[in-house]
Amino acid sequence: MTIKVDGHVDDLYALSLLFPKGVHPNLHVVTRITGTKDGLFDRVCSAENRETYLSGDGCTPVVYERNPEAAGWVALQIMAPLNGCAALADSNFKPVYPVSASWTGEGVEGHIVFGSFISNQPTRAITTNRHALLRELIPSRVGFMSENPLAAHAAAVLAGRPSWAEYYRLLEDIAGRCGTTLDKLAQAGLAKRQALDGFKMAANNRAFGRHGLSKRNVSLSQDALMNLVEAREFVRGVVSAWLDQECGGHFPRDRVDGGPLRFGLDE
């Protein structure tokens, strides 16, 4: 199992130096970039072939995600501790990013592409200017986010990398603000029951969910659980409904591109 990564050649090479085979029991970095010692330091000599891979059993959770976008976010979570250690070791280090994954074994082969490191090609229909109502409702929401720390945090979480733990904590905080609990978001008019139950089940039992392995029900099929794409859409809906309650009006939120979502999220 390998995850192809991309980034600046210095950072790719630095990660390969920090995580050769044997340093971490489940992950190691292999690169075709070549370098040399420069006193106590290292320098890249040749980056004509910059192919760099993360390999090992620790990459396996990516296989459970059939949606490329969700798989890419899981790969980012796998990469995060490596990037973090590299940033601690070298203040000049900038994170590298996963772009694809490949696996073979027991007669099964697979390959999934998350995207390129930098893409300048148009890929989607842009919906941000579709509704005239947006311009009427934006000032109240921006004002509320500027004055309310929870609303500002909600905006930052939505705009950031998806995370089961971050999503769960945010929904608990919003529920508390509304005088209820996460389990009762449906009664509060902030979520639909099917999607809420699907989110809770996935957050508690997904690989890289909010719990460790000892608390997860490993008998559940990962394919049957809500994925991070669906979780992001669910949380986006809860935050939007909460802001509607706090600020008034109904803020339009479109989803044009992308495949169908489960758990009633497309209704």
Image (spheres, rainbow, N blue to C red):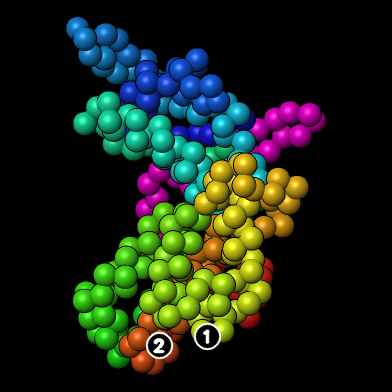
Is residue 231 shown in magenta? no
**139 and 150: which one is in front?**
150
List the residue tagged with mark 2: 245
Q: Is residue 154 above or below residue 49?
A: below
Question: Horizontal placement of 205 versus 177: left or right?
Answer: right
Tell whether position 109 is magenta: yes
* Pointer 2 local density, CA inside 10 Å: few below 14, some 14–19, many at least 20: some
- Residue at 80%, 30% (x, y): give it: 107
Label 1 element class: loop
Relative to 134, does residue 24 appear above or below in the rendering?
A: above
Q: Quadrant of the C terminus?
A: bottom right
Position of residue 187 measured from the top left corner of the image (x, y, whole percent): 56, 84
Q: Which residue position holds label 1?
A: 189
The secondary element bearing badge 2 is classed as helix
**How many numbered dots are placed on residues in this image?**
2
Dot 2 and dot 1 residues touching (CB under 8 Å): yes
In x, y percent, where is residue 63?
65, 42
Q: Report, in whole angstroms, how far the alpha carbon at label 2 lies from the one at label 1.
A: 9 Å
Taking depth in this image into account, of 72 and 79 the one nearest to the observer is 79
**Start-end of magenta stretch:** 102-122
Answer yes or no: is residue 130 visible: no
- Above/below status of 177 relative to 113: below
Residue 194 visible, this angle: yes
